[in-house]
Image (cartoon, rainbow, N blue to C red):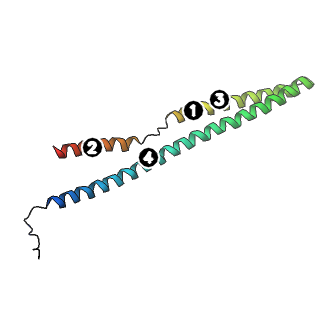
Amino acid sequence: MSMPAQPDQQPSLGQLVSEIGDDLSKLFRQEVELAKAEVRQEAVKAGKAAGMLGGAGFAGYMVALLVTLAVMFGLGAVMPLGWAALIVAAVWAGIGAALFVTGRAQLKRVSPKPEQTIETLKEDAQWARDLTK
């Protein structure tokens, strides 16, 4: 029959190892949650950049359509209507270029690595090394 542990007794090695295992398990779960949050955040940035690139694609379609109409009207009738269509097509080209440049710049800022998680894992590893010294 074992006696109850006295309040002034030191915890056993087994208890300490168990506590460390529990703490490491909890820490790992928290790091995984942090990584998930970072990946979600980066996915939102990538989605916005993709939307801008999609807008640039639509603008490119409009440029092709309006240039075609402008050439058709310009050559067919040699009238001011064709020149007007050409001006509109040039405006669409400018809009498309602006959307493309902005979307590409945002896409370059998207990081696929969970930077904050990597940093905290380095800190955790340093803490564990210092603990074993």
> Which one is in front in this view, the residue at disc 3 or the one at disc 1?
1
Which residue in the structure is indicated by mark 4?
Answer: 38
Looking at the image, residue 73 sits to the left or right of residue 95; the answer is right
- Circle nearer the N terminus (3, 4): 4
Q: Regarding mark 1 in the picture, which secondary structure is present there?
A: helix
The amino acid pointed to by label 4 is: Glu
The answer to the question of whether label 4 and label 2 lie on touching residues, with beta carbons closer than 8 A, is no
Q: Regarding mark 2 in the picture, which secondary structure is present there?
A: helix
The amino acid pointed to by label 2 is: Ala
Could you classify mark 2 by the number of other residues whose Cα lies within 10 Å: few (under 14), some (14-19), or many (20 or more)? few
The amino acid pointed to by label 3 is: Ala
Looking at the image, residue 6 sits to the left or right of residue 91; the answer is left
Which residue in the structure is indicated by mark 1?
Answer: 104
Question: Which image quarter: residue 67?
Answer: top right
Q: Regarding mark 3 in the picture, which secondary structure is present there?
A: helix
- Which mark is drawn over residue 24? none
The amino acid pointed to by label 1 is: Arg
- Which mark is drawn over residue 125? 2
How far is the residue under mark 3 from the one under mark 4?
30 Å
